[in-house]
Image (cartoon, rainbow, N blue to C red):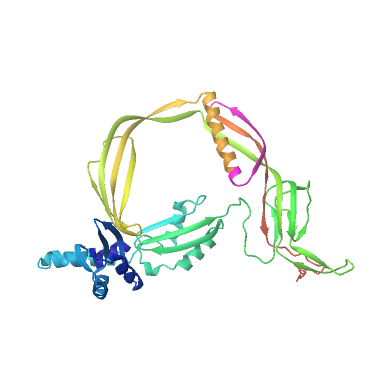
Amino acid sequence: MTKLLLFFKGILTVKLISSTPERFLNICNANHIKMWDLTFIEDSYYFKIEPAEYYRLKGILRKTGSKTVICEKKGLPFTMFRYRKHNCFVAGILLAVFMLYIISLFVWDISVEGNQMITDEVLLDTLYESGIHHGMLLKKISCDSLEKMLRNTFDDLTWVSVEINGTRLIIHVKENDEDFIVQKNTETCNLVALKPGIIQSIVTRSGTPLVKTGDEVAEGDVLVSGIVDVVDDYGTVISQKCVCADADIVIQTTYEYEDILKRTYQYRIFTGKNNKMLYIKLFDCILKLGFSPGYDKYETLLSDTQVKVNDNFYLPVHYGLITNTEYQEESAQYTQQEAKAVLDKNLEYFLADLEEKGVQILEKDVKMYKDSREYIYRGVIAVLESAYTQAEITLPQNDTGETDEYH
């Protein structure tokens, strides 16, 4: 955007002739005169400056006994002056400037940064359903409302920041690192088990623990209650109050693992023949330059480039190359050794994904089975994890059927 503004204003490359160049530069700096690319070549200083700033140098040049020589002029004002008698050229430039201004009022690039578990496609589809899309007016986008909508839609997003830069809508997100615990903005809550298992450790910060190390729990059991007894100096319970239970709990639990691999699979043999087409996309209109491939089966590779003035000023123009490569499909069968290698690799990916989420693997008992059509990996994986979450407090009822009140 800065380069574009400088192009509209114009840029002068100036040579300074002075016996006291340091004094000249210091006075310019004291008067906040903007100049850049200051270089020293063959006993002279060269710098770049805007035309409006250049006219402010007159008094300083007189005061320091210096002179300047304009070596080069660049930018729209000088181009228009040079071709001022060519009406069509000037009109074309003015029209181009007007079109760039109109284009700058819309968003032409939407990007998401910081996401790993939630894909770009899911986030962009959510934005589209909310009315946020390429080609909409920038002034219709409320960053605050968009941030709130994304936080409410995705529980895994702990932080969202939306900014508009040039013709770009940039969404910065941070995802929850915990696999199970989703912090909610509640004043009172229990902590309940998400999976059956055995309590390995529990450290309670607030609330009343209902389990201890070694206890066996089922899914949905309350581990830490948000109802706390209030006692007097003699240890007598005088009342109860509700808080938001908070604790660090590790549960030893298991995963039922199963992975199925078909004995027969298809693979591709590429013939080496390919077809290439150029394409240009303007807004939603696509123009393909070339001939369609005459292949029955082919793989398509698309290289797409969006035209931009700088990093933040994107235009609604794309171009690229479409490459279609012919292939033929053949059938084959896995040997038992090959199938085991594939299933072992899938199991490694599964275990690595669990460890990334903070799950500690204790033991895995997975065996391979086979029938006439499939190879099957099936078994149990023992783990330690924080498999609990917050839940609303369900208040007990008294003898009359009414709910007891807690403060």
Range shown magenta = 354-373
Above or below for 258 versus 189? above
Classify residue 348 by image quadrant.
top right
Taking 164 as reference, is 12 left or right?
left
Residue at the location (21% across, 67% down)?
Answer: 68
Residue 131 visible from this viewpoint: no
Q: Is residue 223 magenta?
A: no
- Which residue is pictured at 71% across the width and 47% down the height? 251
Which residue occupies 12% across, 65% down?
88
Q: Quadrant of residue 322?
A: top left
Residue 156 position within the rendered picture, expressed as x and y whole percent measured from the top left: 56, 55
Q: Position of residue 6 (x, y in %)?
A: 28, 65
Left or right: residue 45 versus residue 368 is: left
Q: Please state the horizontal and vertical placement of residue 32, each as a whole percent of the image.
A: 34, 72
Which quadrant of the rendered structure holds the N terminus? bottom left
Q: Foreground residue, 186 or 170?
A: 170
In the rendered image, residue 29, in percent from the top left (x then y), is placed at 34, 69
Left or right of residue 297, residue 244 in this image: right
Q: Does residue 348 appear in the picture of this structure?
A: yes
Name the quadrant containing residue 98: bottom left
163 in relation to 32, above or below? above
Vertical comparison of 313 with 302: above or below = below
Q: Is residue 362 magenta?
A: yes
Residue lying at 71% horizontally and 48% vertically, measured from the top left: 250
**Front-lying residue, 6 or 39:** 39
